[in-house]
Amino acid sequence: MTSVEIPYSIACALPSLTVIDITNDVSHELARNGHTDGIAYISPADETGIVRVNERETGFFEDLEDLLERLVPLDVADRERLVRFLIGPRTEQIPFRDAELCLGTWQRVLLLGFDGSSPGGWTLTAVG
């Protein structure tokens, strides 16, 4: 069996939540970076995105969208800013060893966008 690695893929596209799996891209960039051990800071390139580490599981995304809609209804002015505030810091910190991200078996690096916005790119800062 042969496997093909896709650099990024859409993990979910719901009415008010878009999630892109950037794990493979981040891993390749880290390998090219030259650091072997340390901490990787992955940040969204624009102000509309948030980076999170989580399992890539459809039920989680649907539950998250439902929760956010209950907390901040879709018709609230400036909803995207309020949702980002509730979710917390925009940057994710991930340790790495031997130039590989230290993630759990099912964990993925996810770039989230809200209210129909498509999350932009991301940046990697490696310290170590």
Image (cartoon, rainbow, N blue to C red):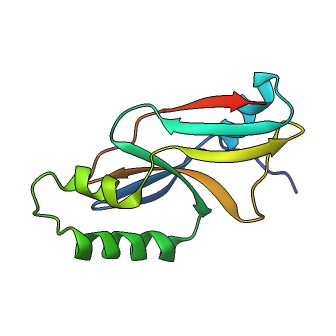
Q: Quadrant of the N terminus?
A: bottom right
In percent of the image, x 69 and y 47: which residue is there?
A: 94
Q: Decide which of 72, 32 is in the foreground and name it.
A: 72
- The one of 84 and 27 positioned closer to us in this rendering: 84
117 or 35, nearer to the observer: 35
Name which quarter of the figure residue 46 lies in. top left
Task: Pick the quarter of the image with the C terminus.
Answer: top right
- Residue 73 lies left or right of residue 3; in this view the side is left
Q: Which residue is at a point 75% across and 46% down the rendered structure image?
A: 95
Residue at 10% x, 63% y: name it.
75
Give coordinates of residue 38: x percent, y percent.
79, 37
The quadrant in which residue 13 appears is bottom left
Of residues 81 and 100, which is closer to you in this image?
A: 81
Q: Is residue 71 above or below residue 18?
A: below
> Residue 22, image x and y in percent?
59, 44
Q: Is residue 44 above or below residue 53?
A: above
**Quadrant in the picture for residue 62:** bottom left
Asked if 89 appears above or below 62 in the picture, the reply is: above
- Relative height, residue 36 to residue 117 (above, below): above
Q: How many marks?
A: 0
